[in-house]
Structure formats: structure tokens, C-alpha cells
Amino acid sequence: MAFVFYFIGAVLALGAWVLRGRGRWVLRSACGAIVAAAIAHTALILHRWIAGGHPPLAGMFDAVVFFSWTTVVAFGAAEIIFRTRWLALFVAATEVILLAYASDFDPAIRPLIPVLKSTWLTIHVFAYMIAYGVMTIGCFAAVCYYAFLAAQGDGEATQRFDRLTYRLVAFGFPLLTVGILTGAVWADRTWGRYWGWDPKETWSLITWIVYAAFLHLRYWSRSWAIEPQRRSAVLNWIAILGFGAIIFTFLLLKYLPSADESLHIYL
């Protein structure tokens, strides 16, 4: 049911982008479809949580479904606070892609394997998933920045997306940091070492460095002799690059030959 509503939302949101200013009622309808999908999505997660007796975060099916859920929740929060309905197309389309991808994995609800029976699981994975959802919306804001820059120039609407990208990254970055730190503690208690340069650990650190660079450049470049538009363009590209690092770390790393060496292979 969630997949169907997300698909309807994506089609309606695409129509709103085509109609531009004349399509606001279509955009509102798209957001309504996304809300309906999010309700069904939440019900699915709660069902699996109750049925399994633990947070549904232990396998790839649950991980992808939960990541897609945090993304739509982050969009909802951003819409309430910042009025970001133009992101609806990217959110709905991403939800369709992620849920279709999740369908390739076994959805069976199974008991947790011993290594995952830890309170650190919930803290570590929740921090990462929320951060990933927020950073995903930050990437979409960066994409909208370029779209509005091309269509309307460096006006107020364009700058709103630039500011939104920064605020979302600034919110998500501490959660990424919590994810790395709690992961290190969990690794020490499970495997007897805080850090082992496991492929997923390494790429998680790379992702963290990309977003750290975004925040540092955003702060320090204000005193540099750079045109504001060029500065914003570079920073928004870094935000998009960071999202690419998230997708590679979370979804694509497992397909590399080196992934066989990872202690995170169960994910």
C-alpha cells in the first residue's frame, strides 16, 4: 500500500514540476499521497517491530525500509518547519526506488543473531538511519538549489534551498558522529576492538569527512574572496557528494569483492 501511494505521489509531484506555478494544487495532492504512504509505511514498521520483539533493523529488508521511513519523516519535518513541498518529487521517487529495492531481500521476521543482541544496536543504527534520512533531504534541497538557480537565477527561492541544505546537514552531522562513536563502543564489546578499518567502517568515516568538510568550508569560506553564488554552488555539490557516499556505504559497498572481509556482512 505504501508503495502505491508513493508512486501516485511521485507522478503528481512530477506533474507539479511540469506545471510550475500553475500546479500548486497538484503539489498539495502529491504531498497528501505521501502522507498516506507514510502512514502505511509506519504501520508496516510497527507491525514488524511488535511481531519480532525487537527494532526492525537487523537485516537488509528492514534496514532499507527503515531508511526510507526516516527519509520521509525528515521530509515531513522539513515541510512543517521550512515549507519544502518542491522536494516531494525527489522524496516520493526515492521511496519508490528504495521499497522496490527492499523487495529483493527476504522479508521474513527472524530472531536477532547473537552479535546484534545489544542495546547499542538501537542507539547505533537509529542514529545512523535518522542521519541518513536527514542528509538525504539535504541532498534533495541541494538539487533543488541548482534547479531553481537555472530557472530563476540566484533569487530568494534559490537561496532558501541553499540555507535548507546547510540546516539539514548541520542537524544530521552530530547524528553521524554519534553513529560512529556508538559503533566503536559496540565493536569493542563485540569484537574486542574499537576500530579495525573494516570496509564499512572506512566508508562511514569517509562519509563523515565529506560532511565535516561541508560544514568547515561553509564557516571558513565566508571570509574568503569568493562570490557568494560560486561558494553556494561548491557547497551544494559537496552535499550531493556526501549523499553519494551514504548510498555507497549503506547499499552498494556489499557488492564489492572486499565486502567479504567485512564484519558487517549480515547487513
Image (spheres, helix red, strand yellow):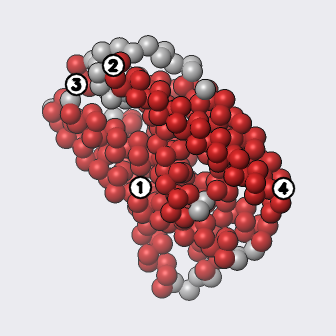
The nearer-to-camera label among 3 and 2 is 2
85 vs 74, left or right, is: right
Number of the label disc, if any, that sits on residue 117: 3
Q: Three-letter amino acid code at disc 2?
A: Gly
Residue beneath the point at 46% across and 56% down? 210
- Which sits in the foreground, 13 or 57? 13
Measure how far apart labels 1 and 2 are at the Cα level: 29 Å
Question: Which quadrant of the view contains residue 6?
Answer: top right
- Which sits in the foreground, 35 or 166? 35
The nearer-to-camera label among 3 and 4 is 4
125 vs 188, left or right, is: right
Above or below residue 209? Residue 35 is above
Residue beneath the point at 58% across and 43% down? 35
Residue 27 picture location, percent across and down: 72, 52
Residue 195 picture location, percent across and down: 25, 40
Residue beneath the point at 34% across and 23% down? 50
Number of the label disc, if any, that sits on residue 172: 1
Residue marked by disc 2: 52
Alpha-carbon neighbours of circle 2 within 10 Å: few (<14), some, or many (≥20)? some
Q: Three-letter amino acid code at disc 3?
A: Lys
Residue marked by disc 4: 19
Measure how far apart labels 3 and 2 are at the Cα level: 13 Å
Instruction: Look at the image and tell me in which quarter the N terminus lies.
Output: top right
Measure how far apart labels 3 and 4 are at the Cα level: 51 Å
Of labels 1 and 3, earlier in sequence is: 3
Question: Which quadrant of the view contains residue 104?
Answer: top right
Instruction: Look at the image and tell me in which quarter the C terminus lies.
Output: top left
The nearer-to-camera label among 1 and 2 is 2
